[in-house]
Image: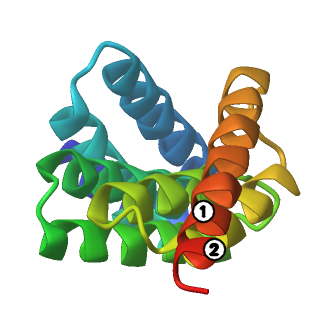
Amino acid sequence: SKQDSLLALSKERRPEFVSILSTAHINIARKAESSGNRKTAIKEYKKVLAIDPMNKTARYELLMLEGLSLYKKGSKSSLWDAIEFFSKASMVNQEDGLASYWIAKSYEKKDNKDYDLIIEAYEDSLSKALPERLRQEAEASKDAAYRKKKTFDNFWK
């Protein structure tokens, strides 16, 4: 394809083309994602990684999208897989709390009695960058998990 031949030429002669093509695909992916078209977004992030395997933005976004798709399925095995994807995303972008937020949500959905894991994931998300709306929700959910844990612990005393 034209893109492949352009890329083959550009990697050796014009390395900035890698950045330009990667940015273009990331922009297409973000636009697709914002309009609810996750399949196209995933395809575009994969194109970025084919061009630039070390692209942190594409790796992070792809892991998050794959994790969210599994989270939405909701089965226990899907939720475990979602937690794995979110954990990998958290390692790629350690400043962003979104992956930890979704880890907490996945633990809640999987078995809302994993209080320690839920609380730990919410605390981790709150220690990082998180949109204000999600920060408030994470704080409230963390507090609710603390209350449930205390009630559960007191019941077994």
In the rendered image, which residue does mark 1 sit on? 151
Residue 154 % position (x, y): 63, 74
Q: Nearer the viewer, residue 61 or 138?
A: 138
Q: Which mark is residue 96?
A: none
Residue type at mark 2 is Asn
Q: Judging from the image, what secondary structure is the residue with disc 2 in?
A: helix
Q: Is residue 139 above or below residue 60?
A: above
In the rendered image, which residue does mark 2 sit on? 154
Q: Judging from the image, what secondary structure is the residue with disc 1 in?
A: helix
The reply to whether residue 6 is in sight is no
Which residue is rendered at x = 70% and y = 36% of the image?
140
Which residue is rendered at x = 49% and y = 28% of the image?
27
Q: Are marks 1 and 2 in contact (CB under 8 Å)?
A: yes
Residue 132 % position (x, y): 79, 24
Residue type at mark 1 is Thr
Q: Rounded to the nearest whole Å, what is the CA distance between mark 1 and mark 2?
A: 5 Å
Q: Residue furthest right?
A: 127
Where residue 40 sits, quadrant-wise, is top left
Looking at the picture, the colour scheme in use is rainbow
Residue 120 % position (x, y): 70, 71
Q: Is residue 2 above or below residue 31?
A: below
